[in-house]
Amino acid sequence: MFQELAPHDLHDKCSHHYAICLDLKKQRFEVLDSMRSAADADLTTHDEYFINNLKETWNRHYEHSKDCGFHTLEYLAKWEGRLVPVVTAAMAIELHTIYTWNWLTNEDFNTRSNAREFIEEAVKKVTKTYK
């Protein structure tokens, strides 16, 4: 994608990838690039373009739902580079179950001390709230 946004200098950017990450705790974006730093004008121009466009999408959301994260996970799992996969509301509900099951049965998660107790206590609190 970088090649199309900077056609004047294909050799510098061709086949090079970097990541733009969202740090929710610090409420900021972080750019991870193995070759360039924040001092590189091409990198900062390019990542600022994407970050500014990403911020625009935050104004859009599902009414009465927070399922956009499940939609995104499913898009990432099924993306083949051409068509965006269809994810319905019913599929999002099923994804809640699947991802929760995968999380709870993950060996790394379950080897942590008190993981099971943490989940059981959290479920008890939620169950009381919704009864």
Image (cartoon, helix red, strand yellow):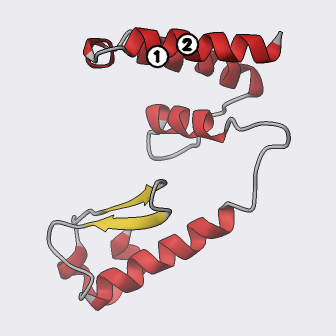
Query: Mark on residue 121?
Result: 2
The answer to whether the residue labelled 1 contacts the one labelled 2, judged by CB atoms less than 8 Å apart, is yes
For disc 1, the marked residue is 118
Residue 91, x across and y down, in percent: 68, 21
Q: Residues within 10 Å of mark 2 (few under 14, many from 20)?
A: few
- The quarter of the displayed image where residue 113 is located: top left
Looking at the rendering, in which quadrant would you find the C terminus? top right
Q: Is residue 5 above or below residue 28?
A: below
Relative to 59, does residue 24 appear above or below in the rendering?
above
Q: In this view, does 21 lie above or below 102?
A: below
Horizontally, residue 131 falls left or right of residue 18, namely right
> Residue 92 appears in which quarter of the rendering?
top right
**In the image shown, does 99 or 25 lie closer to the viewer?**
25
Q: Residue furthest left?
A: 35
Rendered residue at 45%/46% (across/down): 81
- Would residue 19 be seen by someone viewing this image from the given angle? yes
What residue is at 67 percent from the left and 62 percent from the top? 57
- How far apart in space, not on screen, are marks 1 and 2 (Cα)? 5 Å
Judging depth in this view, the residue of 9 and 67 nearest the camera is 67
The answer to whether 64 appears left or right of 110 in the picture is right
Residue type at numbered disc 2: Glu
Q: How many marks?
A: 2
